[in-house]
Image (cartoon, grey):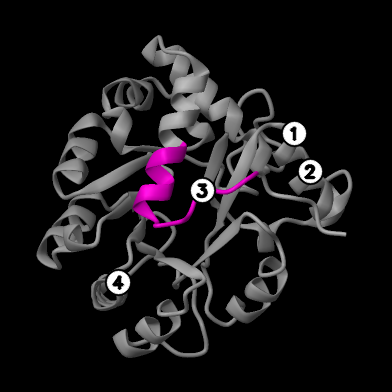
Amino acid sequence: MLVDSHCHLDLLEPDRYEGGLPGVLEAARAHGVGHMLCVAVNLDRYPAMRALVDPLPGVSVSVGLHPNEHSAGEPDEAQLAALARDPAVVAVGETGLDYYRSEGDLEWQRERFRTHIRAARRVNKPLIVHSRAARADTLRILAEEDAGAVGGVMHCFAEDWETARRALDLGLHISFSGIVTFRSALELQDVARRVPLDRMLVETDSPYLAPVPFRGRPNQPGYVHHVAARIGELRGIPFAQVAERTTENFHALFAVAAAGAATVPT
């Protein structure tokens, strides 16, 4: 069994997938994906996301505001904590820093990140961390806010080994996406060989970053098996070992009970 530890089912465009959302879930099940974590990026759209995924077996949710997203109001720690106390919510995020797509004085991003970490610590749930072109500040803030007290994951990791090592030292997991299958991702592939298997997750970040051989097309949770297979090749271990261990890691980190494969809604 596999877990897609990070996807955005609410951002899929159903008409771009055979069979729409039910077809996506059926394809995931056919590839052994037994669980998915649908990650929030926008609080205004959060109720609609919940309405979409709540009826779906084998799908967990997070709550948070992505560093590049804007909602009607900037959430404070108490508001985020109240949302995160929902038993159906397994993590706080997606949160973090993104200096690639934002310009100017980005102190508001750093304060938003701190707010999410404090909310996660208040409710004792792990973080889902996004970091792009901001590695130094991301690691600094994680350390200053004692994010290791709750742990979490550096999602869609695309940095070097030194960054991965420091994140691991802070108590976070490292999650690999379809980027690890790209021919040009030599530095990231080195990281995939070196991250301890018991601190590793796999994801799709659907509908983005489809792995080879689907690069450039809409991504979907079933494609996570290509990520796991590539990691197995890089480490010289069986695909089944990667699948089993990353699934165990997911259930332990997010306190999600292991269950059977996701079923298709009628």
Distance CA(mark 3)–CA(mark 4): 23 Å
Q: Of the residues tagged 3 and 1, which is closer to the observer? A: 3
In percent of the image, x 70 and y 76: which residue is there? 51
Query: Residue beneath label 1, please?
Result: 30
Type of amino acid at the residue the image marks with label 1:
Ala
Q: Is residue 249 left or right of residue 196?
A: right
**Position of residue 132 measured from the top left corner of the image (x, y, whole percent):** 36, 50
Q: Of the residues tagged 3 and 4, which is closer to the observer? A: 3
Q: Quadrant of residue 162?
A: top left
* Region rendered in magenta: 247-260
Type of amino acid at the residue the image marks with label 2:
Glu
**Position of residue 83 measured from the top left corner of the image (x, y, whole percent):** 45, 82
Query: Residue beneath label 4, please?
Result: 120
Of the 4 image quadrants, the one containing the C terminus is bottom right
Instruction: Say whether marks 2 and 1 touch (CB < 8 Å).
Output: yes
**Position of residue 154 measured from the top left corner of the image (x, y, whole percent):** 34, 48
Q: Earlier in the sequence, mark 3 or mark 4?
A: 4
Q: Residue furthest top?
A: 236
Type of amino acid at the residue the image marks with label 4:
Ala
Instruction: Say whether marks 2 and 3 touch (CB < 8 Å).
Output: no
Q: Does 256 lie within the magenta span?
A: yes
- Count of numbered marks: 4
Instruction: Say whether marks 4 and 2 touch (CB < 8 Å).
Output: no
Q: Of the residues tagged 2 and 3, which is closer to the observer? A: 3
Q: Residue 26: which numbered mark, if any? A: 2
